[in-house]
Image: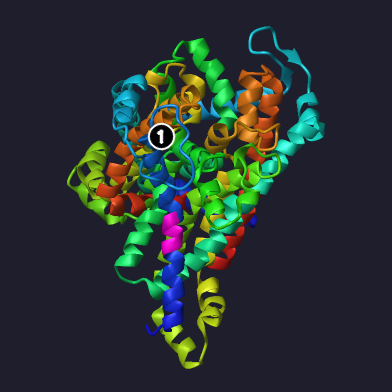
Amino acid sequence: MKVARLELFTGRFVLIVLMAVTLVPFLSMFTTALYPSESYPQGLPNWPADPQWGNFVEAFKIANLSTMLSSSLLIVLLTVPISLAISTMAGFAIGHLRIPGASLLLLLFVFGLTLPYEGIVTPLYFLERQIGILNGRLAITLPLIALYMPFAVYWMRAHFVNMPPEISEAARVDGASTWDLFWRIHVPLARAPIASLGILMSVWTWNQFVLALVLVEDPNQRTAAGALGAFQGHYATDIPLLCAGSLEILLPTLIVFILFQRQVIAALLQGSVKG
Amino acid sequence: MSAADRSMTETILAGSDAQTDRQRRARRTFRFRKVRRETLLGWLFVVPALAIYLAFVILPLAITVQYSLYRWDGFNTPVWVGPDNYVNVFTDPDLLNTIFNAFKLIFFFSLIPVTLGLVVASIIRRTATGGLGNVSRTVLFLPQVIPLVAAGIVWKVVLSLTGVANGFLSVIGLDSITRAWLGDFDWALVAVGLIGTWVLLGLCTLLLLTGMTKIDPALYESARIDGAGAVREFLAITLPSLKQEIAVCVTVTVIAALRSFDIVYVATGGGPGLSTMVPGLDIYLLAFQARAVGVASALAVVLIVLILVLIIPIQWLSRENGE
């Protein structure tokens, strides 16, 4: 493609400016984190005269970061596999087995797609208080799995509805049961959409804030985002320490993103197209 | 149907019945049983997902509607007040202001990212096909991956009185307009909105860019032969081909604007005053701090309906045009 030199220049300039706007805030957090605790570094990101690397150790200790991160990981490991399993089964039944009432079921699930979490978090609190699971990891896990169902079932159904029925018919002739059909034939064929859905739900879970804030009091039993919220509440005045702690909580997400950027970007893009 | 016809049909039916009555009945029950067994099995596959969805989404949703008709502090016996809470939502200037703020945020969360996203995606497609394009994709997408809470904290630091934003303004000689942006009655909502722009620009850009790569290059070739410039090309070819992707962007970003919570909670807490209060945050504060569960629930119902009312036409329009 032939593009005029002026356009080439302006275009690239705009891109570089936008990248700077994206990255400078992170950079400024990093330099700020190296200033003495409780100081107020001023102006543009500047390398401090005497970088306080100890701030990162300090923040790691006071934010109880190791507990926090393992708690968040545990919630992801509880939430994502269960969500994947039950939404794949439901998507299979609705999209491929076409059970009676499938379209109604789909409508019921799709109805939840645009539901704001804030809309149901109040009754969730009182409901969980009543059945006694408030303030534990189940308090986040169970509603999260439920809230993922509209998207996850819709996503998996979209895959199964496009699978040619001949595959199943052939297996049926060979005497496969419905469970064999699902587990031996269709789940292996659905590996790609299941993997994307897994990435999506892991990111969403790690970043979940509202549910963690309302349903779990102890930051050590929350998701990473929930813990971060509590941390900034306590250390809002100590900017360098706040920056150090925030960066540490962000680090796992950033590493995973940079390692799997292609898959993560693809999954998130597909996610918004189908959602 | 005439009498003769009917009797004939009956005869045929009777005849065939007599012929293989027992066989057919046996086969029918067998098939019936098999179908019922499969249906039952199929339903078993849906039961776990359906059960947890009903228990932790649909039931709470129903309870929200129920709460919205009562006055309740969360502890004592709820008092039935009928539609009073809804009247409250639509007449109390503070609550109305909250809803208006959500609409103002649509400008920053939706309109700017989608428009700017179109421009940036065109730029990447036309001028940055190599390494710069790949790097910019990853970098611009970064804010979409980190928790919104983190975005809030990052920008709280950047926009503070001593932050980078003011530092930059001083350097370019605009010292006079520096301020604590998130603490300023006139500017806080704009500042919160721009955080949303920062978060959502990358997502919109990449979605639109994906759409652009699907456009047939021959269209652009013929436009160039006709002597169309970049702007003509954009208006005549790119924009109409991207209807579907634009609809997706608008849907996602409008929902993000209306249900904004994390960024506002961290960056301003709704303040100063109520200048950045949004429905999501207000629901939380009303229910758990003001202990006005009824009003909070009414606001929640209004928010849920509002999102549906805004999103359904967008989806409907894009389907109609796109397919």
Relative to A173, B274 lies left or right? right
Subunit ID for the residue under disc 1: A
Asked whether A127 falls inside the magenta stretch, the response is no
Q: Residue at x 68, y 7 (%)?
A: B76
Q: Nearer the viewer, residue A184 or B10?
A: A184
Q: Residue at x 26, y 46 (%)?
A: A186
Q: Is residue A124 visible?
A: yes
The residue at the far front in this view is: A49
Q: Secondary structure at mark 1?
A: helix
Q: Which portion, as a residue range, is magenta?
A: A16-20
- Tag count in the figure? 1
For disc 1, the marked residue is A243
Q: Residue B134: x percent and y percent?
A: 32, 63
Q: Residue at x 40, y 51 (%)?
A: A23
Q: Nearer the viewer, residue A170 or B210?
A: B210
Q: Is residue B7 visible?
A: no
Label 1 sits on what residue type? Cys
Seen in the picture, residue B293 relative to B181 is either above or below; the reply is above
Q: Main secondary structure of the magenta part?
A: helix
Seen in the picture, residue A103 relative to B53 is either above or below; the reply is below
Relative to A240, A125 lies left or right? right
Q: Residue A37: x percent and y percent?
A: 40, 27
